[in-house]
Amino acid sequence: MGVEEDVLSSIESNKTMLADLEKDVWNHPQIGFHEDYAAKLLSKVLEEAGFRMQRGVAELPTAFVAEWGSGAPVIGILGEYDALPGMSQKVQAQKEPTQEGGAGHACGHNLLGVGGLGAALALKHAMEKDGVKGTIRYYGCPAEETLIGKVFMARAGLFNDLDAALSWHPFYANTVWNSQSMAMNSFKLNFHGVSAHAANAPHLGRSALDGVMLTDVGVNFMREHMTTDARIHCVVTHGGEAPNIVPSYAQVWYYVRAPKRPQVDELYQRLLRVAKGATLMTDTTNDVELIAGCYDYLPNQVIGQVIARRMKQVGPPEFDETDLAFARELRDSVPPEQVEGTLTAYRKTREDLGDPLSDTVLDDVGSFTRGEITAGSTDVGDVSYVTPTGQFTTCCLPLGVAIHSWQSCASTGSGIGAKGMMLAAKVLALTGLDLLTSPNLVKAAGEEFAKAISGKEYVSPLPEGLQPPKA
């Protein structure tokens, strides 16, 4: 049996264990920086398999690094395991939470983290049995949903000596993620004024809410004079206590997104100046609370080509009639226009994609195509500006089902998600094997990376004084 067969047979032999593991994580959903259960569970499996462990890295209690082997090349596999608040859902086609108001894995990070773990175990097995040289690392990354875990880890230099990093994400299509994502800043503006009776003595008050509202008016005018790819969205998280009290405190929460990090930095500073102007108009003050900042994702085409070849070799997940029947129910629970919208976004027909589940491996698919910009953001972007990075998606959701929905949570806890995860584990492991055994491939990926960043050193978007939250 060759080394490739050893990798694949290792994953197959661990199939039941991996399925049980991801379902255990799914059954114990915890939001970012509170993923104690998943972090302990996954790190224990890796430690018992012989990996060298570093826990609590980057001062993050639920972050860890597991390492096997020595020397170059050093290949990293990124794992995530945080859930989303309020997304609790049973594995069924009717909306019903497992725990009212509880968290749920509506983004499939239970699958993401365990799929990467399966690949790491398979590579270790092959390295031991077949004498493959190099180092593999599994990164336990918390708080991706708030776009901050890997940013703290990147700031701490945890990815600096990697020759390449690999990741994946549960989605609908089986394809390489060749597009870039949006860079982003998440921040809150806290306005402070003076309270007074709104009818009896309004002249004595200085409304913090007026500061918030005038800021948003200014931002609306600002939208006319920024790149059309950029996005600014917000919610007012605190607007006052009652209409007859001039609010002494108000808060607005903004996301600023743009295709490139420097564009975010510029828009962020412009918005802060707008807010400053609002304080002058209302005789109030404000302070800024930066919550998260991340880079755009920079896909490495050299690694992407390897991923595409390996994905075609393994083939799409083999869903059975039980999977298909459940997928049809979930698909039919969303509006028809949402299904059509998915087809439009992927720029494919139902026959091309597969309905209700993707039954093919696609080279180019809509917004994931090279040169495209996906509307969302991910902290994998920060890793991609430190080391050559490749990622892909596999079918873990039915056609039309959106991530961050109750239907998605139901699917990621079902056999559909488990089968998509197994494909991901195999593709990650085989791609990792290629990088470990092909010096020219690592060199080519590095050369592409150096050209893409034009020699610019990664600078963390987080201010120096911003510290990780304490448990």
Image: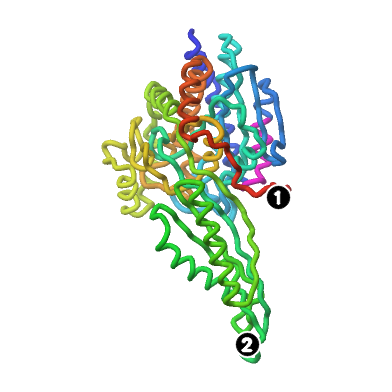
Front residue (pair 90, 376):
376
Mark drawn on residue 465? 1
Determine crowd level at label 2: few under 14, some 14-19, many 20+ residues with C-alpha closer than 10 A. some
> Looking at the image, which residue is at 57% across and 36% down?
457
Give, as a single range, the part of the protein colored magenta: 31-43
Q: Which residue is mark 2?
A: 202
Which residue appears farthest toward the bottom when viewing the image? 200
Tell whether position 66 is magenta.
Answer: no
- Left or right, 227 with reference to 73: left
**Which one is closest to the eye, mark 2 or mark 1?**
1
Q: Count the numbered circles shown.
A: 2
User: How far, Cα to Cα, is label 2 from label 1?
Assistant: 39 Å
- Left or right, 466 with reference to 451: right
Query: Residue flagged by tag 2: what amino acid is it?
Result: Pro
Point out residue 449 in the picture as x, y percentages from the top left corner: 48, 30
Kindly tell me whether residue 17 is visible in this rendering: no
Point out residue 86 in the picture as x, y percentages from the top left corner: 56, 54
Element assignment for label 1: loop
- Residue 143: name its quadrant: top right
